[in-house]
Amino acid sequence: MNEKVLKTLEYNKIINMLKDEAGSDLGRMLCSELKPSNDLNEIKKNQLETDDALKRIWQKGSVSFSGIKDIGESLKRLEIGSTLGVGELLSISSLLKVALRVKTFSRNEDAERDSLDDLFESIEPLTNLNKEIEKCIISEDEIADDASFNLKNIRRQVKITNDRIHSQLSSLVNSQNGKTYLQESLITMRDGRYCVPVKQEYRGNVTGIIHDQSSSGSTLFVEPTAVVELNNKLRELSVKEAEEIQIILANLSISCAEYIDQLRSDLKLLPYLDFVFAKANLAKKMKASMPEFNSNRFINIKQGRHPLLDGKKVVPIDVNLGKDFTLLIITGPNTGGKTVSLKTVGLLSLMGQAGLHIPALPGSQLGVFNEIFADIGDEQSIEQSLSTFSAHMVNTVNILEKADSDSLVLFDELGAGTDPVEGAALGISILSFLKNMGVRTMATTHYSELKLFALSTEGVQNASCEFDVETLRPTYRLLIGIPGKSNAFAISQKLGLPQYIIDDAKSRIDADNEQFEDVLAELEQKKRQIEKDKETISVYKSQIASLKRDYEIKNKTLDEKKDKILSKARDEALDILKEAKETADEAIKTINKYGKSGNMKELEKSRSSVGSKIKKNQSSASMKSSKQKKTYKPSDFKIGTGVKVLSMNLNGSVVTLPNADGNLTVKMGILNSKVNIKDLEIIDEPDIKAPGLNRTGSGKIKMNKSLNVKMELNLIGKTVDEALFELDKYLDDAYLAHLPQVYIIHGKGTGTLRNAIQTHLKKCPYVKSYRNGEHGEGGAGATVVEFK
């Protein structure tokens, strides 16, 4: 992509915004090198990575890539067997800490695989190597005593020797003679050896080696003979300590050399992931979405917003180009948004081809262009003695030489700066040439001739930036299909120009031009009415869809109730039939038994029994049919009373007593609802089960929830009470999410907040340990917490 269009469309400002989202210098370097691609497969791959990173951010929050160090030179030194310095080893440790942090962030067993999984899986935290470096090196200025047995022993001897020297010199300094001979009662060092400040006149009273004297010559710094041997031993121990440190660094370097390939891979992967997540964070800030790409050079931007304008004020535009027409001519008044529309299309195309999401609605489409050309703005050059028209024409000539069917061309005020008749004729010729080549082109203009050209030429479409004559303000809405109207007479009239001057001006316009302006006005009015009707239809469609959903739900509920009622009725009918059959069978047996013998007494007894059963069944059926809901009084309800909410068919328990209107609150599982006592039926025992809640044997309720917790909590600026409140909740969530360790960021300040947090951590039952942050972790401004 040519550098001129990147500058013209201010692509570099987007890159600067992207760099601000990166967490490391290497990540920012990758951001600064980002250029649009014309390879469709590469574009889709980059867009997918950005989208997958954005999904992870929405699900789990962002991850910090701060601490990535460029260890490239150190790896080269390791390859040739060199020993790394303390700073280089700390840089490797810092890189591995980031690797562990990112690897931990990436773990999500329940999620589907995405385009970033392979990258995350290739990261090697090399935990054992990093622990060894951390164990040996405390900071750039300090090696740990436990780095080796010899170093610990040497430093123990150094301490013993120092104590003996201080003991010898302290006895001299604190003696009566010492107070006389010495300039001050203190012990000092010169050239790494312990000395005392002796007055010049008492030089002979203190035997030893003179190492220095004051500028006035009144004080001599003497190493007493009694400590010369001890100082010599101290010097020897210092040399041994330095040699042992070199051995430690050499061993650490050998350990690092064993993992050169893994370290080199981490050095490549981590900055790249930092770059990908910077793109995702920028998309989140811009409320951007992933565009769909096609090889047909078809553009369909839905509610696109210029990313460099205030998101709260910018008016979104809908633009399509390349399907029904390849040339779009935009007209309208100055400051109406024509140039912004051009820049929006051009800049969003550049961003999309660079793998960045665009600030537009999902489903927006972009074509893949080999080149984008733009002639926008005042190109007047004093140095080259070129007028505005000449400068624009130089650009136009260059565009016509290089543009082809795989290009997108943007012209701002084509043909302006010269005679209107000639300028319009040139504009039509230039646009016709590009149209015949199949070049996707957008151009803004004031010329009516170009409006007529668009109306009369197939494959060319008019568009305009809407202008509200009543308020004399542009709306910045882009209306495709409607040529813009100049509105000069209407604006002049609103601003107070006398009517007779306006009438005289109108009389000087020929009938064709006046008729054309009237047609434009009518088209614009119809366009507005159509837009208004579309909005009304959209509202009606939404309401109809909602009513349809409600109707379907009610139908489904009614069907379910109907099925239940029919099923129950069938069961009851079968029971009645079964009982009737049994009664009939029994009666027949009785008749057969006693009818032949003429025993009328037994027959009458049997008849009475059958009649009693029939009456009993009739009474039972009558009771069922006449059964009504019991009426309750407010006094019947107490807190904890088990009830059934009839309208919701759910069981629960009373939480609050009824008010004057008979309304009370019922708890149904995790749901609290205010209902009237008329909608309640008292039951023996409340049923508080609800989805997501299970009673254990001990009566406890367990809740299953998916925790997506960040690796760090920022408490800077919080009061102690606010911080501890947030800390408790965060630790609970992090522990339940099985995070191995987290970072509490509190800043350095006076140390009050840090002390309060660390005191609180001591009392937390599931905190295994905590410590101040180390090199690359925020130092004393952060606390690292490890869970049990």
Image: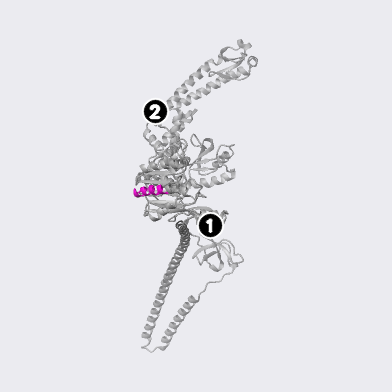
Q: Where is residue 418 in the image (x, y as percent from the top left)?
A: 45, 45
Residue lying farthest to the top in this orientation: 204
Query: Is residue 11 shown to the viewer in this render?
Result: no
The residue at which mark 2 appears reads as: 77
Q: Where is residue 526 in the image (x, y as percent from the top left)?
A: 46, 60
Q: What residue type is labelled 1?
A: Asp
Q: Where is residue 246 in the image (x, y as percent from the top left)?
A: 44, 25
Q: Position of residue 390 (x, y in %)?
A: 43, 41
- Name the residue located 38 percent from the left edge and 42 percent from the top edge: 397
- Name the residue located 56 percent from the left edge and 37 percent from the top edge: 748
The residue at which mark 1 appears reads as: 503
- Name the residue located 54 percent from the left edge and 53 percent from the top edge: 492
Q: Which portion, as a residue range, is magenta?
A: 424-439
Instruction: Pick the quarter of the image with the N terminus.
Output: top left
Q: What residue type is labelled 2?
A: Arg
Mark-to-mark CA distance, 2 and 1: 86 Å
33 or 626, which lies in front?
A: 33
Residue lying farthest to the bottom in this orientation: 598
* In the depicted structure, whether residue 623 falls above or below residue 77: below
For the stretch drawn in magenta, the main secondary structure is: helix
Determine crowd level at label 1: few under 14, some 14-19, many 20+ residues with C-alpha closer than 10 A. Answer: few
| Quadrant of residue 167 within the rendered picture | top right
Q: What colour-coding does the image apply?
A: one colour
518 or 406, which lies in front?
A: 518
Determine crowd level at label 2: few under 14, some 14-19, many 20+ residues with C-alpha closer than 10 A. Answer: some
Query: Is residue 435 shown to the viewer in this render?
Result: yes
Q: Do the residues under discs 2 and 1 have CB atoms within 8 angstroms?
A: no
- Looking at the rendered image, the disc whose residue lies closer to the viewer, 2 or 1, is 1
Residue 265 colored in magenta in the image: no
Q: Earlier in the sequence, mark 2 or mark 1?
A: 2
Indicate the secondary structure of the residue bearing disc 1: helix
* In the depicted structure, whether residue 434 falls above or below residue 257: below
